[in-house]
Image (cartoon, rainbow, N blue to C red):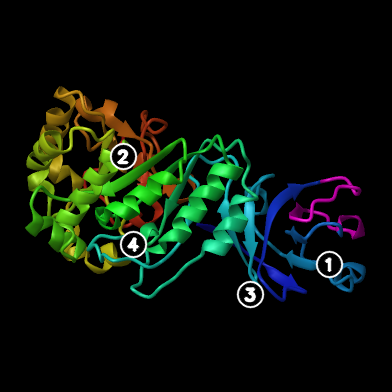
């Protein structure tokens, strides 16, 4: 989630609203937040005002209107974006209208503790359902795709169903992708109730890190292997679209070909398999000595795994990898998968002829990346 920072006037509580730019004085939307270089009293019909100006007139200051001033990078805000204004001056960009990587972050609670997880999670119950429902009502109905993530979204129980129902009602043309560890779907009734929501275009992305319970369970730090498989099978019984996600680490890279064979033989119905490079934040950074491996070192294993699946006509992709590390035969599987707001390129990429096609790096990986990066 991208954030901006400013100073506040009359900011007493958090506000959620949709960005408007240079709207006429008669414009009125109770949910609009005006982003402007030149605030004046004609802008007071908005929920709040965001400006990069540092000097605010006395008439505006005394108006009682919530104002965030001195905001740098104001030009990053686009019409239709949805932001949360916090009383401390922080502006969280929860939805970017021009982005294809928007997600609904529904909880920090998780029932796994994956050694390479880049997301802050907790075992304590957190539930952002009300905020998420308010956000859904502000999102552009023409949004093509939207993710639902956490934490572990299925731990919300019925509230997850309410979120999906709200998407179905307010965003009828938006495809959803739910990221889940799959464990809760081992409960047949839960899987059935999930499906009964009846969303017309939904996909569930579930991680599988090894073809054996020992390796997978160690990576996720819980005995979830067989429950995850059962969850995937239950979803398949209801004809739900399932994607398998495999984050490659020092703990599982040698088993990638065997995992590919396992998926083909046991889960031939999945619609997509993604091999993913690590984002080295949070637990991944904490456990870096155990989980990190230079991607250059596992290319032969990755190539074999991709070939096993591709030859069997399974849909396979490679996420979060740089083209200069991949054998050219794998380039056609590589995807620019990193969200734009956290996607960077390092100095070595400056003269690369393939930069526009390459997925680049996570910002968190600026100082933690392969030693073999080079311009092509």
Label 3: state its secondary structure.
Answer: loop
**Residue denoted by label 2:** 238
**Residue denoted by label 1:** 56
Q: Mark 3 and mark 4 in contact (Cβ < 8 Å)?
A: no
Residue 346: which disc?
none
Q: Alpha-carbon neighbours of circle 4 within 10 Å: few (<14), some, or many (≥20)?
A: some
Is residue 53 in view from this perspective? yes
- Of badges 2 and 1, the one in the foreground is 2
Q: Nearer the viewer, residue 278 or 134?
A: 134
Label 2: state its secondary structure.
Answer: loop
**Which contiguous range is marked in magenta?**
23-43
- Of badges 4 and 2, the one in the foreground is 2
- Which numbered disc flags the more N-terminal residue, 4 or 2? 2
Q: Is residue 255 left or right of residue 51?
A: left
- Which numbered disc flags the more N-terminal residue, 2 or 3? 3
Taking the spot 52% from the left edge, 48% from the top edge, the residue there is: 165
Label 1: state its secondary structure.
Answer: loop
Q: Alpha-carbon neighbours of circle 1 within 10 Å: few (<14), some, or many (≥20)?
A: some
Q: Nearer the viewer, residue 75 or 60?
A: 60
Residue 281: which disc?
4
**Residue denoted by label 3:** 88
- Of badges 1 and 3, the one in the foreground is 3
Residue 325 on image: x %, y %: 22, 38
- Of badges 1 and 4, the one in the foreground is 4
Q: Is residue 19 above or below residue 239?
A: below
Q: Nearer the viewer, residue 71 or 373?
A: 71
Q: Nearer the viewer, residue 216 or 90?
A: 216
């Amino acid at each position: 989630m991208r954030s901006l920072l400013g100073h506040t006037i009359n900011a007493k509580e958090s506000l959620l609203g949709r960005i408007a730019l240079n709207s006429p004085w008669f414009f009125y939307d109770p949910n609009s937040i005006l982003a402007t270089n030149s605030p004046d009293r004609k802008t007071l019909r908005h929920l709040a005002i965001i400006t990069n100006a540092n000097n605010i007139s006395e008439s505006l200051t005394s108006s009682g209107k919530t104002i965030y001033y001195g905001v740098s990078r104001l030009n990053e805000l686009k019409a239709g974006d949805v932001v949360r204004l916090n009383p401390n001056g922080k502006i969280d960009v929860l939805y970017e209208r021009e982005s294809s990587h928007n997600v609904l972050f529904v909880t920090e609670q998780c029932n796994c503790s994956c050694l390479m997880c880049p997301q802050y999670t907790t075992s304590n119950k957190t539930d952002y359902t009300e905020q998420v429902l308010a956000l859904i009502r502000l999102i552009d109905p023409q949004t093509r795709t939207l993710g639902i993530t956490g934490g572990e979204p299925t731990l919300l129980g019925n509230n997850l169903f309410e979120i999906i129902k709200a998407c179905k009602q307010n965003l009828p043309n938006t495809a959803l992708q739910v990221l889940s560890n799959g464990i809760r779907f081992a409960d047949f009734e839960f899987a059935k109730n999930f499906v009964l929501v009846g969303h017309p275009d939904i996909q569930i992305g579930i991680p599988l890190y090894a073809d054996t319970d020992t390796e997978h369970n160690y990576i996720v730090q819980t005995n979830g292997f067989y429950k995850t498989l059962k969850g995937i099978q239950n979803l398949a019984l209801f004809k739900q679209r399932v994607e398998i996600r495999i984050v490659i680490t020092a703990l599982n890279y040698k088993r990638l070909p065997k995992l590919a064979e396992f998926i083909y033989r046991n889960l031939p119905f999945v619609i997509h398999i993604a091999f993913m490079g690590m984002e080295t934040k949070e637990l991944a950074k904490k456990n870096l000595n155990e989980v990190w491996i230079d991607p250059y070192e596992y290319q032969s294993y990755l190539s074999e795994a991709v070939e096993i699946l591709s030859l069997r006509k399974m849909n396979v992709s490679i996420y979060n990898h740089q083209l200069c590390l991949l054998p050219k035969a794998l380039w056609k599987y590589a995807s620019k998968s990193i969200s734009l707001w956290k996607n960077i390129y390092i100095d070595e990429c400056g003269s690369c002829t393939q930069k526009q096609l390459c997925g680049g790096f996570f910002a968190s990986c600026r100082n933690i990346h392969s030693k073999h990066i080079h311009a092509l």
